[in-house]
Structure formats: structure tokens, C-alpha cells
Image (cartoon, rainbow, N blue to C red):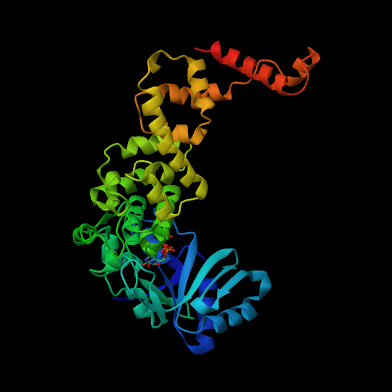
Amino acid sequence: MKLVRSLDFLDISSDLIIDLALQAKLLDHGRLALVGGAVRDAFLSDLCSGACQRTPDLDFVYEGDMNLFCIRLQAYFGLQRMQQLRLHDHFGTATLQLDSVRIDLASARLETYPSPAENPLVVFSSLENDLSRRDFTVNAMALVVNADGDSELLDPYGGSHHLISRELVFLHDESVSEDPTRVIRGARYAARLGFSLGTQSIRQVKSTLQLWPWSWRFGDPVDLVPPALGTRLRMELELLFNNEPWPQALSSLQDWSALSLLDQNLQNDSLLYPRLRCANRLQLPLLCALLSAAADPVALSQRLQIPGQQQRWLEELLLFRRWLETDVLITSWGEWDALQWTCSLEQECWTPEVVALSICDHQVCWRPLLRWWGRWRHVSAEITASELINQGVPPGPRLGDELHKSRLQAIERMR
Ligand code: CTP
């Protein structure tokens, strides 16, 4: 489909885009096109009368040499207008800030996957081939911008029809197997835009995941995991939790049987939402809380390479769960008061975040754990160190003991 229209419908200065297109034309007549989320959101905004949020950055694809293009842009715009230019010549990409607009530039490329879920091999190519490597039809539209202020829509996969039917449709049958992170992207877009994944695309997700494993199986060394099942999957999950309506996105992933990408326990867990809602209230990192419900949280956290401190919390959580079973739940813990809970927990030096993760398990004893986490652990001694010194207690271990005793007395008086 080809559609010529003025650039005015974009929510940004069309002069800036026209200037970019002019520089591309003057350089070597290579086409310059706005692609990805900016095009999708602009058309969507048009369809629903401006109700759609704009993407914060603009992605352009350029059919030509990125290094030469950046040199030309620098000379034309000058340092005042064009800031923070970062050129990755080898990858044919650049990011820059132009009149405070963040712009990502990439040379048009074709990607092939040496094996499923690995990073793709890249060769510079045409705009059409660049669109063919993308995830969803609505993200595979390009507005080729002309120096006269018009633009021409390239929409080889019918993305504009799917914008109207509010559907996410993969470009081809191998899309998920090549890049399984697209399933998480689909859940993000569906939740954010109120779209649904097309029937054939849902079939593709389910059938591809049933064919698991890729070259890597659960239990294989985590450092051999392909990036799209490891670090890149984590990055998409972080975007899901940080930027999107995550309850809807997670529910879509479960509906599509897609949480088996992470772990079968997560896929089958009907209490995932209450767990994460609890984690949200306790201000825990949600991805870490999600992984805590996996069959092997530690292995999964290593596979996804979540931050080291969170990996250690999950290791400690396994010990904490065992401690609860062997040292607490077999006792008459229901009769324990604030002091006994505090002494038991603090004697073992459990990390507060680990206790918080365990509260999200909704174990039978979650209430006293929550009271410790929320109140008892914050109680301080009723007397200060300087008051004790004034009373004749010498600085040193005895002072520490007295302060500790005073704190425990304060807790003992609590209900
Ligand atoms: N893309 C893809 N497959 C991926 C990642 C990205 O096909 N695994 C393509 C999509 O065409 C996407 C574009 O690269 O539109 C840019 O990716 P990204 O910046 O993540 O998304 P945006 O298009 O900017 O959309 P949004 O920011 O709204 O998520």
C-alpha cells in the first residue's frame, strides 16, 4: 500500500524531519524513513483522534552510509542543535538529540538467524528488507520522508489494516522461533495499546513453545543459553514491569501458554497476580518476585542475568523457606508474640527483602512476617547511646547490649 500524505499529522516538528530528509537526499539520494513505534502511534492517534500516547523517541532507517550521514548532519545542524551524537559505525547505527528530540538512526539492514533465539547476522540492505525483519505488521510500516514535506507510506504487510482491527500479527511463521522475545513484546503492546494477538499468531506462539527446546534445554549450563532466552528476554520483561500495565500483560502471557518460556511452574501458577500485587505493595522488584515462584528460581535468575543482589535474595529465599518449614511451622508459632518473632528472625540475620519475598508466597505465617517487616524491625531502643553514657554506661560492648535490651523491651510492649 502506498499513501502519500503531508508530515503534519506527526506530533513533532515536520521541519526537523524535512531537514533530515534533505540532508539524506543531498548526500547520496538514499531514502530516509521513519519506522517502528513512531509510525504506528502516529497512525493510531489519527484513527482514535489523538487518544494514543506518542513514543518518546524517533527511529529512522537510512539507505546509505551512516558515518557519512552523521558527518553531514553535524555540519548542517551544528553543535547547538545536534547534541549527544553517538555513532556505532560498525553496526551502522547512531543515536542523537536534535532540538531536544531523541533520534535513533540505523542503516537499512537484513537479518538472518544462524540458529533460533541466537542474535541475528546483519548485512546492510534495502528499506523493504529492513521491514521484513521486524516483529509485528503494525511495527513494520515505514514513512519514507521526502525533502518537499510529503511522505510515502510503505506498508508491505498490511499493518494499517491491523491497526484498524487492533490486532498484533507476526510477519511470518518463524518469527517466535527466531526471536522468542517477541512474545513478551506482544504482551507489552497488547496491554498498552488494547490490542489482541491474532489467532494465527497465538497458534504460532503455542506451537513454537511446545517444540521447546531450542538448541538449549532447561538444565543445560546457563552461560550457553541463547540471548533471546536469556538476557534479551530479561530486558523485555523489565520493560513489561517498568513501563506497561503489567497485570494485563502477564495475564495475556499465561493465556497464550507463554510463561513456559520462563518456567512451567509460572505458567501453571494461578496465584501469580496476588503474588505480584503483594510484591508491588512491598516495593520489591517485580521480576525478582515473579522468578521466586519458579521451580528453580536461582537457575532462572542466572539464566536471565537479573542483578546479582536479587540473585542472592533468591538463593537466600530458598534457605528461608526451608527454615520456615523445619524451624518454625513445626512449632506452636501461632502463640509467638512480637518479641519471639523478632528474636527468631533477627538471630538468623534474614535479609528484609527475603522475608518480604516470602510474605508474597502467602505462607500460613505471612501475617507475623509482615508485621516484623513493616513494624517490629523498625522499632528502636527507647533510650539513646548518649543518655546511657550520661547514666554511666561505658562506650563499648556493654553499651550495645543495653541498647539492644532497650529495643527488645520496646518490642515486648507491642501487641
Ligand atoms: N523490533 C523487532 N523485534 C525485536 C525488537 C525490535 O522487530 N525483538 C523492531 C520493531 O519493528 C520495533 C523496532 O524494532 O518497532 C524498534 O524497537 P523498539 O525501540 O523496542 O520499539 P518501538 O518501535 O520504539 O516501540 P515502543 O517504544 O512503543 O515499544
The image position of residue 176, as x and y in percent, is 28, 64
| Ligand 1: quadrant of the figure | bottom left
359, 103: nearer the viewer: 359
The image position of residue 118, as x and y in percent, is 36, 68
Q: What residue appears at the point 27 percent right and 51 percent down from the top-left corner?
A: 260
Residue lying furthest bottom: 28
Residue lying furthest top: 413
99, 14: nearer the viewer: 99
Quadrant holding the N terminus: bottom left
The image position of residue 144, as x and y in percent, is 41, 77
Q: What residue appears at the point 75 percent right and 16 percent down from the top-left corner?
A: 388
91 vs 387: above or below: below
Q: What residue appears at the point 35 percent right and 29 percent down from the top-left corner?
A: 362
Q: Is residue 111 left or right of residue 260?
A: right
183 vs 375: above or below: below
The image position of residue 258, as x and y in percent, is 27, 53
299, 382: nearer the viewer: 299
Q: Quadrant of residue 182?
A: bottom left
Residue 160 visible? The answer is no
